[in-house]
């Protein structure tokens, strides 16, 4: 019997190496992302670059650009659509304006756990959800990490009543804005680059972020509490420019596709360790971690479901597929 791990290994071993003389010139590709060199994006991207370089005999090189060096997420999407960027890691909310059905993935408490979300998105439902990218000039190579987002704040709370009126910076996605509004908080537009200062000056009281972001981007210096609401599991996706990818020799396309699973697995493993270490670092830095009973928060946020689903043309069908995959275990 071939296990999942063995199958993954066989897939990478089967990646076709480019034969000497099969390519006349070096093929250089650019991969962009918005996070730091310490992020899971970068770990997976550099692993992909090494694998592709090795399987191609050095004929295909992927240069990785971190820290928004090729632009923010919206610019990366546009650049990939017009072929100026070859590959990118991007978050799902940044794609919602173009692919409105992706808004379903921003439903609050859509998943029972971080692990369940990863399992479903790495399975048949996740693969089907990559197909719409083809219609906007992109190719979805794989879902990647899920960033479990909770609330960092200077105002302690453990119930919706205590959180009422709290000014919170959220991702500008209907699923995020409507969720926190339904709970009774006040979503407050704030550029991510200005968020640290906004927290320090009290212009906002809180933000919803993954634990590793709280450490990596220094928000730990501006807040006292981290409330584990686990409201959203934000998915990322590895994407190729369709116009650029389809011009590559077929064997190069196969090398890239066959190298993706190992790179993704390495990134996911790294992130899980990084995430656990982040909680330890939060405690070490004196941040109080609050674990509320989220039942009341879920009940309040569920009132936003209809508004969120109504903005997604096939939202209820997508939600039904996700729920069926969750139930299948």
Image: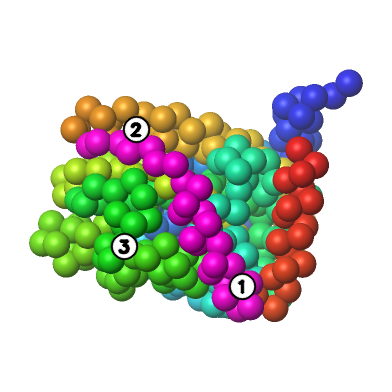
Out of 244 and 110, give the one closest to the viewer.
Answer: 110
Q: Nearer the viewer, residue 156 or 281?
A: 156
Q: Earlier in the sequence, mark 1 or mark 3?
A: 3
Confirm or deny contact between disc 1 and disc 2 (CB under 8 A). no
Q: Secondary structure at mark 3?
A: loop
Residue bounds of the magenta highlight: 287-311
| Furthest-front residue in this view | 161
> For mark 1, what is the residue?
306
Quickly name the residue at label 2: 279
Instruction: Describe residue 290's horizontal placement relative to residue 274 as left or right.
Output: left
Image point (38%, 38%), residue name: 291
Q: Is residue 152 above or below residue 272?
A: below
Q: Nearer the viewer, residue 52 or 159?
A: 159
Describe residue 220's horizontal placement relative to residue 73 as left or right: left
Residue 72 in the image, given as x and y percentages of width and height: 39, 67
Quarter-of-image position of residue 326 = top right
Q: Which of disc 2 and disc 1 is earlier in sequence?
A: 2
Comparing 319 with 45, the one in front is: 319
Distance Cα–Cα, label 1 vs label 2: 34 Å
* Prevailing SS of the magenta stretch: helix
- As displayed, is residue 328 above or below residue 209? above
Front tag of 1 and 3:
3
**Residue, disc 3:** 164
Q: CA distance from mark 1 to mark 3?
A: 22 Å
**Residue 186 in sight in this render:** yes
Q: Which mark is residue 280?
A: none
Asked where in the image residue 71 lies, by quadrant, the reply is bottom left
Secondary element at tag 2: helix
Is residue 308 covered in magenta?
yes
For the residues labelled 3 and 2, the Cα–Cα distance comes to: 26 Å
Label total for image:
3
Q: Nearer the viewer, mark 1 or mark 2?
A: 1
């Amino acid at each position: 019997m071939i296990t999942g791990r063995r199958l993954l290994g066989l897939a990478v071993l089967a990646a076709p190496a480019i034969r000497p003389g099969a390519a006349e010139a070096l093929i250089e590709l650019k991969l962009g992302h918005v996070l730091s060199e310490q992020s899971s994006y970068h770990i997976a991207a550099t692993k992909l670059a090494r694998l592709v370089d090795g399987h191609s005999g050095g004929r295909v090189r992927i240069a990785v650009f971190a820290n928004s060096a090729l632009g923010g997420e919206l610019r990366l999407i546009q650049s990939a659509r017009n072929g100026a960027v070859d590959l990118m890691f991007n978050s799902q909310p940044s794609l919602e304006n173009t692919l409105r059905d992706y808004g379903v993935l921003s439903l609050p408490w859509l998943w029972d756990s971080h692990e369940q979300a990863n399992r479903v998105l790495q399975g048949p439902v996740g693969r089907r959800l990559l197909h719409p990218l083809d219609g906007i000039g992109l190719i979805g190579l794989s879902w990647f990490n899920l960033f479990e987002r909770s609330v960092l704040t200077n105002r302690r709370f453990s119930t919706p009543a205590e959180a009422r009126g709290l000014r919170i910076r959220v991702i500008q996605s209907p699923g995020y804005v409507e969720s926190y509004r339904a709970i009774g908080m006040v979503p407050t537009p704030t550029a991510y680059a200005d968020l640290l200062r906004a927290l320090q000056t009290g212009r906002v009281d809180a933000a919803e972020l993954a634990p590793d972001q709280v450490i990596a981007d220094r928000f730990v210096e501006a807040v006292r509490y981290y409330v584990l609401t686990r409201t959203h599991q934000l998915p990322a996706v590895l994407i190729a420019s369709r116009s650029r990818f389809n011009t590559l020799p077929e064997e190069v396309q196969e090398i890239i596709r066959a190298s993706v699973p190992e790179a993704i697995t390495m990134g996911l493993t790294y992130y899980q360790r990084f995430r656990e270490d982040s909680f330890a670092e939060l405690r070490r830095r004196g941040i109080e971690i609050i674990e509320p009973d989220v039942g009341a928060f879920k009940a309040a946020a569920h009132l936003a479901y209809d508004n969120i689903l109504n903005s997604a043309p096939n939202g209820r069908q997508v939600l039904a597929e996700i729920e069926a995959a969750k139930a299948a275990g």
